[in-house]
Image (cartoon, rainbow, N blue to C red):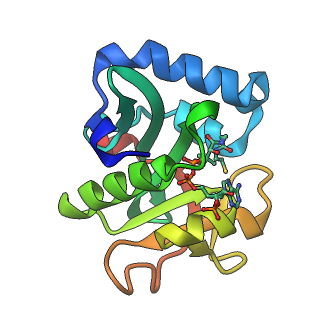
Amino acid sequence: MNDLSLTILQETPDDVPAIEHLNARTFGPGRFAKTAYRVREEVAHIPELSFTARVGTLLVGSVRLSPILIGEAKALLLGPLTIEPPFRDRGIGQALMARALDEAKGKGHRLVVLVGDEPYYGKAGFRPIPKGQATLDGPVDPARLLVAELVPGAFDGVGGVIRPDWDAQ
Ligand SMILES: CC(C)(COP(=O)(O)OP(=O)(O)OC[C@H]1O[C@@H](n2cnc3c(N)ncnc32)[C@H](O)[C@@H]1OP(=O)(O)O)[C@@H](O)C(=O)NCCC(=O)NCCS
């Protein structure tokens, strides 16, 4: 991807239909049953921490962050991260994620959690949560429950059930 042709912008209300269409096409109806989806369904994502990737005016990718609690600690849930199939494997997913994590850190957030593949998300600083330290209320492969510390040591002493942070809205 030529850097000059890719822009990453904060999500706006006008982007919502295209993002939902992209996620529906990518994940299908099965997404509604996913444990992480059900957390996100209960709490709105944070538009200031959610980003779109564009090539020209075409929306080719999206990442969203939503407010959660891990036990009593404030954190963010990353997802969905989705790139339009013809634009995959050009670094757009990692670029979107780097931007979202950078903005979150700049706004004082300390922890980000997601459910995904460690070989991919490990490149962005995520690592598996030690089994049992934090849990989602629903079926999740523990090896896919990952955390990134935006501040070194932020996950020390944190644990418990991951749930929506309604107070953050
Ligand atoms: C996963 C996804 C977001 C990656 O976006 P992308 O823009 O293609 O990713 P990047 O270009 O930043 O990185 C591509 C690299 O990651 C690798 N990769 C992609 N998905 C991977 C995965 N699930 N596990 C391990 N590696 C993966 C690619 O093979 C490629 O490797 P290379 O750099 O050695 O060639 C995109 O493929 C997508 O939208 N997939 C469908 C939705 C999805 O699965 N979302 C994530 C849920 S876990």
The residue at the point 46 percent across, 13 percent down is: 17
| 15 on left or right of 146 | left
On the question of residue 160 being in view, the answer is no
Instruction: Decide: is 41 above or below 139.
Output: above
Q: Position of residue 12 (x, y in %)?
A: 28, 23
- Number of marks in the rendered image: 0
Tell me: residue 137, above or below residue 73.
above
The answer to whether residue 52 shows anywhere in this view is: yes
Q: Residue lying furthest front in this view? A: 2
Left or right: where does residue 43 sit relative to residue 129?
left
Q: Residue at x 42, y 24 (%)?
A: 59
Q: In which quarter of the image is residue 43?
A: top left
- Please name the residue shown 57% across and 16% down the image: 21
- Horizontal placement of 19 versus 134: left or right? left
| Front in this rendered view, residue 83 or 88 | 88
Residue visible at 76% across and 33% down in the picture? 33
x and y, in percent, of residue 38 in the image: 64, 36
- Is 143 or 21 nearer to us in this picture? 21
Residue 86 position in % (x across, y down):
61, 32
Which is nearer the eye, 124 or 92? Answer: 92
Viewport quadrant of the C terminus: top left
